[in-house]
Amino acid sequence: MKYRNILLPLAVIFIASCAKPINTHPTYTKILTPDESDNIGGSFLESEDIRSMSSIMAVELLSLPEINFPEKSPVRIAIAPVQNSTAYIFDKDILSRKIRLELSKYAKGKVRFISQNKASQRMRYKIIHEQDEANWQPLLEQSAKTLINSNFVQSAKNPLRVGLLAPKNINLTDMNADSFMIMFRSELLKQGGGNLQFIRDTGKESAVDYWLTGEFFAEGIKNYELKQRLSSASVLINPYVAIASQSEITIEKRPNVAKSLAILLVDSKGEQIVFSDLHNLERKVNTGLGRANFMLTGEVKGLHKAAGGNRSDYILVTFQLVDFLNNEIIWEGSYETKKVTQRSAVYK
Amino acid sequence: MKQKKLLNVRQYINKPSQKFFILTSLVLLSGCSTIYEADRVDEAEFSNEPRVGFVRPDKYSFAIFGSRSIGEHVEITYERLTENEAGFPQVELGLRNKGGQNFWDRKAQGINLSIKTDFYSSPINSKGPTGSPVYQTNWRPLRTVRGGTEHYQAICPVKGARYYQIRISEHLK
């Protein structure tokens, strides 16, 4: 009776206190480290295998004299797609990606990889072309300045009369050649200070001293082939152009070729080119693979066996570092596993 | 009226049993603060941790019927730290599965282990590692066949790591 007043409140406090043991499974999902087995089954490569393989191979690669003591630093590596020769369908690039991650982490700048991500390549393509487009106006300004300051313009007693001729457009793609020439004419008038007078097309050749014209060309487009197809095909789609009929041309894709413009000033009498200025309007966007020193490639092979509900898999993962100049394999590493399971699993 | 109430409270507090109750409540309530100090590792125990250590099994059976302890089945044949040809620190460890050697351990077979090495550039002194590791391998699966010796090798891609700790566990699951 003496301690009744104490015991009851104490019991309540103890029950409501913070002494609840820690809940190690607060949700339906259990968090594992990538090295832990998930206990789902399956006998193929697991995350622990991929991590082990990549860390072992990355260190072996870093120990190579070609990488550790290179003739030229940094060493650039391109990654070829891994070949999967097993019965399993899985994202095989996870293997090379993990090796790349390990190498990038510990190479300390000795190794560089060429980005081969398609989505990032598309973004890079856009960035470079936008930079090129931003450069068009300064290019025309510079060209106009060169022409205005040239000897034959400066030494002319009277203002030179110039007519505009439609430029020769070899590039059948996405550039409006006329607009470039009109922009250039405007720039000449702005900077000319009366040295140049532009004459509207009157049909009289005697009215002009010079013709301002240009030539657009794109490196790498097979122009003659396109013309042949234009005349023969009613419907044709090639990588660059979709043609519905002879009169209708639809640009399907911006071709990745260098596009240039040559601005020409031609003497109307002797048809002599008195001024020429060549500008690169758009660069060809290269993947950068041409700068690679080595190529990392790999293959996953398997020996599969199944009987009843049991399944056994021997998996051999090999990677090679190839000097693509002479096709020599300068390093080859392997990782192998053999697992047997009573519970097959689907890998994706 | 107010003074009477205060007097009643004072009398309540002065009772020995009530004093005990209030004190206990305060102690328990103070334990419910959101942040509390984390326990530190025991330095004496930590300093005794070996360079190559077996992790105790997740559960024990009664010892007389055989234990799942790795030490009963696996022994270290050699352990050395060298440098590979590129100058990277390299740890080599021989692990022999000695098999069942007791009448209660007749079923001992191959053992699946997970093994991990941490490399340090700062010394591991009497208080344990003095810095964070410069490189850690993952827990690599390693199967030891009964009677066989496995040669584990871990290379650290960071030069200058002269200290290491190896932990060997049951296969992580």
Image: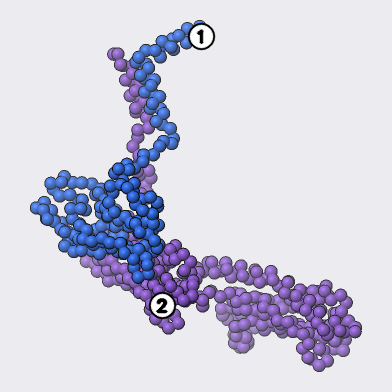
Chain colours: A purple, B blue
How far across and how far down the image is residue A33, in percent?
36, 53
**Left or right of A272: which side holds A134?**
left
Residue closest to the far bottom: A270
The residue that label 2 is drawn on is: A322
**Which three-letter amino acid code belongs to the residue tagged 2?**
Val
Residue A94 location, quadrant: bottom left
Whether residue A40 is visible, yes or no, is no
How far across and how far down the image is residue B126, in percent?
32, 47
**Which three-letter amino acid code belongs to the residue tagged 1?**
Lys
Dot 2: element? strand
Whether residue A225 is visible, yes or no, is yes
Residue at screen point 84% across, 82% down = A153
How crowded pointer 2 is (Cα within 10 Å; few <14, some 14-19, many 20+) is rated as: many
Residue at screen point 62% across, 88% down = A224
**Left or right of A185: which side holds A30?**
left
Q: Return the chain for callout 2.
A: A
Distance from disc 2 to disc 1, alpha carbons, whole Å, reads 94 Å
Q: Of the residues tagged 2 and 1, which is closer to the observer?
A: 2
Residue B45 location, quadrant: top left
Q: Are marks 2 and 1 in contact (CB under 8 Å)?
A: no
Residue at screen point 25% across, 52% down = B54
